[in-house]
Amino acid sequence: MTQSFPKREFLIVGILAAIVLVVLPCLNAFTPPESAFHVSTFSLSLYGKYLTYAILALGINLLWGYTGILSLGQCLFFSLGGYALGMHLMLMIGRLGQYKADIPDFMVFLEFPAKYPETGGLPPHWIPFKSFWFAALMVVVVPAVVAYIFGWLAFRSRIKGVYFSILSQALTYAACLMFFRNDFTFGGNNGLTDFKTILGYDINSPGVKRALYLCSGGLLLLTYLFCRWLTSTKYGLIQRAIRDSENRVLFSGYATANFKLFVFVLAAIISGVGGALFVPQVSAINPSEMTPAKSLEAVVWVAVGGRGNMLGPIIGAVGINAFKSYATHAFAEQWPYIIGFLFIFVTLFMPKGIIGLPEQFRTIKRRIQQRNKSVDTPAESAVATTSEGVAK
Amino acid sequence: MTETVSVPNVALAHSKDFILLLEGVNKAFDGFKAITDLNFYLDEGELRVIIGPNGAGKSTMLDIITGRTRPDSGKVEFGRDTDLTRLNEYQINRLGIGRKFQTPSVYVDHTVFENIWLSLEGSRTVWSTLFSRITPAQKDRIYDVLKTVGLTDKAEWKAGLLSHGQKQWLEIGMLLAQNPKVLLVDEPAAGMTDEETHKTGELLHSLEGKHSIVVIEHDMTFVRQLARKVTVLHQGHVLCEGSVDEVQNNERVIEVYLGRKKKA
């Protein structure tokens, strides 16, 4: 039954949460740098980045693994959340920038004061982002609104499957091209960078880095719990029913478009929040984060980790990115081939991803056992599979 | 065209007695006329069988009734003057018209119990599904339905593990859970064993009177078992209507449909 929270998963999550939220930050804060157990602030920030990716992956999983909607543009929402907070951080640089001006450097460089003389060079829509809370609100609102408009149009027109995937990819590519333009007022191809402070604290200080890391870990845990709750409700059942037989749901009186729109907007919000935590930890956001390749990569994390459950995407996102950090040092040129091969391999031989491996091994083991003794009891295999189904 | 305009006016007087009414319905796909001037009337509580060779427009007719396809012209009404041509699939379903598909469509990853639960009549909004809990009354109702379709002992099974016939029954159960006024059942016996087919016939008979039922069928043994008024469709048009025997002895029917069947 879907209602129960599997005890083993609860235990795993508890242990992981303890390591991520307590052990690692403590090792960073309370051990001397020369100690073998010390976790450097750089490493901690890197892990923080992985955790924000894991949040993004959970959003993709909610769409793809549970509703059967494969969006290839989720990094757009991740970036939009990132840009919203990034705008606030840009404005907080104040006169600490290269040009010692009141407005962000790129605006001076691009001669914005001439374009927007009445605001001293600041485009009007930037002004409210001086408030942290406004920016924080926009982290949620902007991805949600974009997802709502796009989703409403797409789902109402019954765009499904691969057509939806292509459109979502086109959407993020279009946004990417727009953000590349200097006159779009978001810093062109350099994007937003060189942040100095967040809420008045030095953004590069170990304490703030640690706090941001903890926020990422905490939010990942919250997102995980939220997704767990959502998929255990009747809504969650309908979600998977749409994935398995959308027509049956539609002809049972459910307006499936609304159900899909709801989860699409939710996933966008989750991605946006992830992006907002990503930006201060890597100290930059630029349009390359919106390229379709980024969104595709995020889909690969979910596929490799295992979709349709809650731990797989987290394992995939953290695992592949940790591997990538290593691989791009060791053999940078080959990385695209490695991830491409990984995706093909997983799709062909590990349909349930890393998380599904134990089950896959068990099935293989059972099959081998059966083959050894099957000749006299051919009926047993059928009984075994059905009783397993009942146990589930 | 003037003819088709005048026909509905005549029938309007009768329409109050019918739960489902199709009059002068036409539908063409890229020039191919799937439905031509189709007239079809279903009484309340009636069990009706529709037969016809492949491409006769049987499934298209169901598509038109359930809002999947819009007719090019004609009248499609439910009960007292509810125009179905303006509504979409889920709105039509909410009025009380349930449809079983030709290939069994159940939620393979859910338990049999959950399959019925999702189909149970009640609020269908996103919000209500987020916070609704299953009530004891709903549970009882689900087990009632499972009993009717004979799947009580499979309640906790995943629907994907059911046999083909059991999936067909589950889908019929899912329709019953909606407590529909009209049941549209597309080839319920397809792919079933003789015993299963017989059981399905009994099931449909037991529902007669409580629901108005339209069954589309190919299998003449099964049609005979149902032994109710039969409508023969041919080239998107009603060829004739009557009892199984009347229909089977009809010259034109033998020519287009049963003649071939008898030879086989």
Image: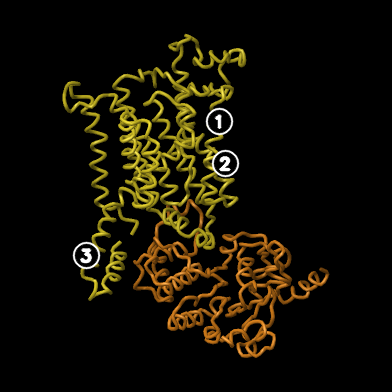
Chain colours: A yellow, B orange
First in sequence: mark 1 vs mark 3: 1
Q: Are marks 1 and 2 in contact (CB under 8 Å)?
A: no
> Residue at the spot x=38%, y=40% of the render?
A339
> Residue at the spot x=30%, y=70% of the render?
A382
Residue farthest along the left direction in this orientation? A35
Question: What is the CA distance from the residue labelled 3 to the residue labelled 2?
Answer: 54 Å
Nearest the camera: B81 or A62? A62
* Mark 1 element type: helix
Circle 3 chain: A
| Residue density around tag 3, few if under 14, some if 14–19, many if 20 or more, within 10 Å | few
| Residue density around tag 1, few if under 14, some if 14–19, many if 20 or more, within 10 Å | some
Q: Left or right: where does residue A353 sit relative to residue A174?
A: left
First in sequence: mark 1 vs mark 2: 2
- Nearer to us: label 1 or label 2: 1
Q: Amino acid at mark 1?
A: Leu
**Circle 2 is placed at which residue position?**
A149
Residue farthest along the top direction in this orientation? A100
Instruction: Let me know if marks 3 and 2 both belong to one chain.
Output: yes
Locate the C terminus of chain A by quadrant.
bottom left
- Nearer to us: label 3 or label 2: 3
Q: Amino acid at mark 2?
A: Ile
Locate the N terminus of chain A by quadrant.
bottom left
Q: Amino acid at mark 3?
A: Gln
The x, y position of residue A376, in whole percent, is 22, 76
**Circle 1 is placed at which residue position?**
A177
* Mark 3 element type: helix
**Circle 3 is placed at which residue position?**
A369
The x, y position of residue A259, in whole percent, is 50, 51
Question: What is the CA distance from the residue labelled 1 to the residue labelled 2?
Answer: 19 Å
Q: Quadrant of residue B95?
A: bottom right
